[in-house]
Amino acid sequence: MLNQSAPLDRVFQALADPSRRLMVERLTRGPASVSELARPLDMSLAAVVQHVQVLEASGLVRSEKVGRVRTCAIEPTALRTAEQWIAERRTSWEHRLDRLGGFLAEHPDP
Amino acid sequence: MLNQSAPLDRVFQALADPSRRLMVERLTRGPASVSELARPLDMSLAAVVQHVQVLEASGLVRSEKVGRVRTCAIEPTALRTAEQWIAERRTSWEHRLDRLGGFLAEHPDP
């Protein structure tokens, strides 16, 4: 249960950085080379490569090198897993609110 | 755009730890004291307090001290913000897939 290397740890960790979120955002519009990912970012290509590696390790992104160009693409499963975890927690909280509301409706102030 | 202290950074960072996710999970079922949050976790109370502080800084949790007991509760807005960010990215990716599918349907192999 507390396995530190769980996929969710890595996905949320990967999404905790604004540059990496920008890369994910770009890749949801279609595959891109590392240089294309680097374009809007004010950082070295080496730093961009490191961010890509974190995204790949999290499962959010996969990449393939053809010749001298590494092309990255989104891997939607990891995104879905993270979304689902949050949605389940939010739903659990909302159900609790509904139950509370029901209880209060049935037990009005005297 | 690349503001490191953006709320999403902190929310995803807070969710990147399995103990903190367990605390969030517990709190979606209702408020709990710090000792109650600590019960299923194999760590010192001081470590639990630190995790609670990270959760509070992220906006996912708020806490209030009455007498000697600090009670924590979920703050659903931050959870919703993170969920929405992921959902929008996933939707953008799925729309792209739909457009690709439409294009391929209109341009079958000769």
Image (cartoon, coloured by chain):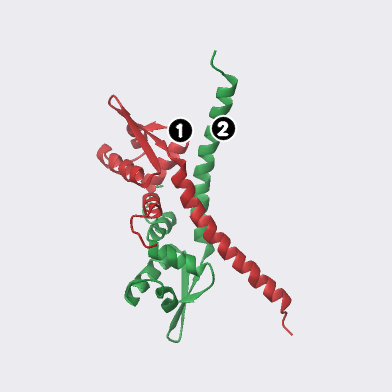
Chain colours: A green, B red
- For label 1, the crowd category at 10 Å Cα-Cα, with few meaning under 14, some 14 to 19 and many 20 or more, is some
Q: Secondary structure at mark 1?
A: loop
Q: Residue at x 35, y 42 (%)?
A: B56
Number of labels in the image equals 2
Residue B43 appears in view: no
Q: Are marks 2 and 1 in contact (CB under 8 Å)?
A: no
Residue labelled with disc 2? A98
Residue A52 location (% of width, % of height): 40, 70
Quadrant of the rendered image containing residue A5: bottom left
Chain assignment, label 2 = A
Q: Secondary structure at mark 2?
A: helix
* Subunit that carries the residue with mark 1: B
**Whole-percent x and y of residue A46?**
32, 75
Residue A25 position, x and y percent, is 48, 65
Are the residues flagged by discs 2 and 1 from a single subunit? no
Residue located at (34% from left, 31% from top):
B64
- Of residue A7 and residue B52, the one placed in the foreground of this image is B52
Image quarter hosting the N terminus of chain B = bottom left
Residue with the mark numbered 1? B30
Q: Amino acid at mark 1?
A: Gly
**In this rendering, which labeled residue sits more in front, label 2 or label 1?**
2
User: Distance from label 2 to label 1 (Cα)?
Assistant: 12 Å
